[in-house]
Amino acid sequence: MHSDLFYHIALTMVPHIGDVHARELLQHFGDAEKVFTARKSSLDHFPGIGTVRSRSIKAFKDFKRVEDELRFIERYNITVLRQTDAGYPKRLLHCYDAPFLLYFKGNADLNHHKIMAVIGTRNHTDYGKEMTAGILEDIARHDVLIISGLAYGIDTLAHKAALKNQLSTIGVLAHGLDHIYPSANKSLAKEMTTRGGLLTDFMSGTPPDKQNFPKRNRIVAGMSDATLVIETQINGGSMITAELANSYNKDVFAVPGRATDAKSAGCNYLIRSNKAALITSGKDLAAFMNWGEAPVKKKTIQKELFTEQTAEEKTILKIIGEKETVSIDEIAAGCNFSSSRIAASILNLELQGLITAMPGKRYKCL
């Protein structure tokens, strides 16, 4: 297992090999070490790899850096999650660019039954602060895991409001776990590791460079059932996250603002262009997400004893059972449920042991 993790980490360090290529290589060769020991000719002819990427793989020699990372992981009790690990966020597996590896420090269930991303501008108004506090207070009874980016502004307010209302919260970072950015959130981040956690796909020593934030945002959008935008300018970073959520077929919500308020221009645009549903309270949000019922508890009964799936779960189970494997798009085409209901139903079916996720965002019955 240690050796397998060693080469998983090494594969993320190879230039020109991103998450998608790493996953495809792993699926083809069976394990990460075989990617490095494969003949260059085999790599050259692998679809999408070619001579440039195969040359990068064969030239990679920085295994000392991998050893350093393993020592860092062990020293600080960090959990490393591969896509095949049980603790890996299953919602991310529905995304074509799901992180090949994730580094996690905390105690939250990354497959919690209700996950909401709350995002917004770094320079919020009093209105944004009030709406964040009110909405988080409203949805506290629904036991929602709150995700944000630990940035200044709405992100920080969302994390603090979650903790205040006894909700777990996860900060997704655009850098390694060896430091916190912004540094003003160090104490908040420490508290979050005891009720939630910190998550990243970047190795230690990675600084919060500008290009890292869109990568961070895809995790925020991808592992949530829905994304709530509180306040954002028309060109704010939250707009990237909202667009990513839409591309992943996730529900997006936005709080409206005055037509003349630049800090609400992004939210107003999302609503006007039908890219986000308008909400003004946590009750609106709970109604959209159909959170009126009590949380679904995980069961440990053998799968033969499951006889009471929801109507949505029964429909999706029937669709999956009609073929050897079924893609998420085929499931969506076979029913008229919202993307969030499909994702929730699939997750529950997986937890019940009735279906399993396959490579390429496909599912099969067990």
Image: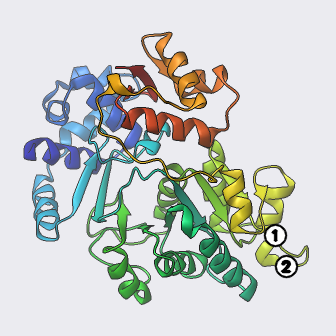
- How far separated are the C-alphas under marks 2 and 1? 6 Å
Quadrant (top left/top right/bottom left/bottom right) for the C terminus = top left
Q: Say which residue label 2 marks.
A: 261
Quadrant (top left/top right/bottom left/bottom right) for the N terminus = top left
Q: Where is residue 283 in the image (x, y as percent from the top left)?
A: 71, 64
Q: Say which residue label 1 marks.
A: 265
| Left or right: residue 44 compared with residue 128 | left
What residue is drawn where x is 12% and y is 31%?
37
Residue 52 visible to the viewer? no
Q: Dot 2: within a 10 Å radius of its alpha carbon, few (fewer than 14), some, or many (20 or more) residues?
A: some
| Left or right: residue 206 compared with residue 268 | left
What residue is drawn where x is 51% and y is 74%?
162
CB-based contact (under 8 Å), mark 2 and mark 1? yes
Secondary structure under badge 2? loop
Q: Dot 1: within a 10 Å radius of its alpha carbon, few (fewer than 14), some, or many (20 or more) residues?
A: many
Amino acid type, label 2? Asp
Residue 258 visible to the viewer? yes
Q: Where is residue 33 in the image (x, y as percent from the top left)?
A: 14, 35
Numbered mark located on residue 20 in the image: none
